[in-house]
Image (cartoon, helix red, strand yellow):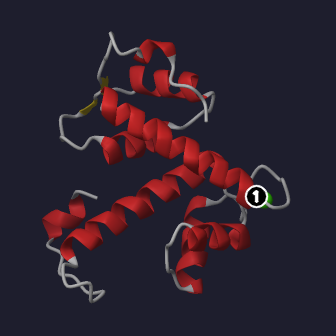
């Protein structure tokens, strides 16, 4: 795992405004040495903005850092043909390994959504993981009896 960037020393704890297209993207991309598109950055930051402040504080950033580094290692380990991308079969194994129980139809639909000609880049893989994690957490919060069924109101869905 990459060390935290020096700008995030304990004495200096800036917050990253996730609505800003400039600073958050630049800092995170430089820090992780990975290029993410703006939408992926927004997804990542909104996932960890636990206090709904619209910014990432130090602890939220540390959590984001750990999650993304874990997914990066995961991406590399499931890219079995070392193509630098994940195809449908590789994605299915990765999602199963992460504990997602999805039908073959759902995996195919996700692959179509996040891939270019069947190949999912790391950037899109992260976007896919963030979205699935957010949906799963939202579902679990409402599925209090763990029956696999929940009721959503339109306002709940619009926040995802
Ligand atoms: Ca691959």
In this view of the protein, can residue 22 be seen by the observer? no
Pick the front one: 89 or 157: 89
The quadrant where residue 95 appears = bottom right
- Number of residues whose C-alpha sits closer than 10 Å to that of mark 1, classed few (under 14), some (14–19) or many (20 or more): some
Q: Residue at x 41, y 61 (%)?
A: 133
**What residue is drawn where x is 22% and y is 79%?**
143
Q: Residue furthest top?
A: 11
- Nearest the viewer among 21 and 50 is 50
- Residue corresponding to mark 1: 79
Residue 160 percent across, percent down from the top left: 28, 58
Q: Is mark 1 within 8 Å of ligand 1?
A: yes
Q: Is residue 23 above or below residue 125?
A: above
**Total count of labels:** 1
117 horizontally vs 20: left or right: right
Figure quadrant of the N terminus: top right
Indicate the quadrant where residue 85 lies: bottom right
Where is 104 relative to 160, above or below?
A: below
Residue 142 in the image, given as x and y percentages of width and height: 19, 74
Nearer-the-camera pick, 64 or 11: 11
- On screen, residue 99 versus residue 49, left or right, reads right
Vertical comparison of 59 with 43: above or below: above
């Amino acid at each position: 795992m990459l060390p935290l960037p020096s700008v995030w020393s304990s004495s200096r704890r800036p917050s990253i405004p996730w609505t800003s297209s400039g600073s958050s993207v630049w800092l995170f991309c430089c820090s992780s040495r990975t290029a993410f598109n703006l939408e992926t950055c927004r997804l990542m930051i909104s996932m960890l903005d636990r206090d709904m402040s619209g910014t990432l504080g130090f602890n939220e950033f540390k959590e984001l850092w750990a999650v993304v580094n874990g997914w990066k290692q995961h991406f590399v380990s499931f890219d079995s043909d070392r193509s630098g991308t994940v195809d449908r079969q590789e994605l299915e194994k990765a999602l199963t390994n992460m504990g997602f129980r999805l039908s073959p139809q759902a995996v195919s639909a996700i692959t179509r959504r996040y891939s270019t000609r069947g190949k999912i880049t790391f950037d899109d893989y992260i976007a896919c993981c963030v979205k699935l994690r957010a949906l799963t957490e939202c579902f679990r919060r409402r599925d209090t009896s763990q029956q696999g069924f929940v009721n959503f109101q339109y306002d709940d869905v619009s926040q995802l």
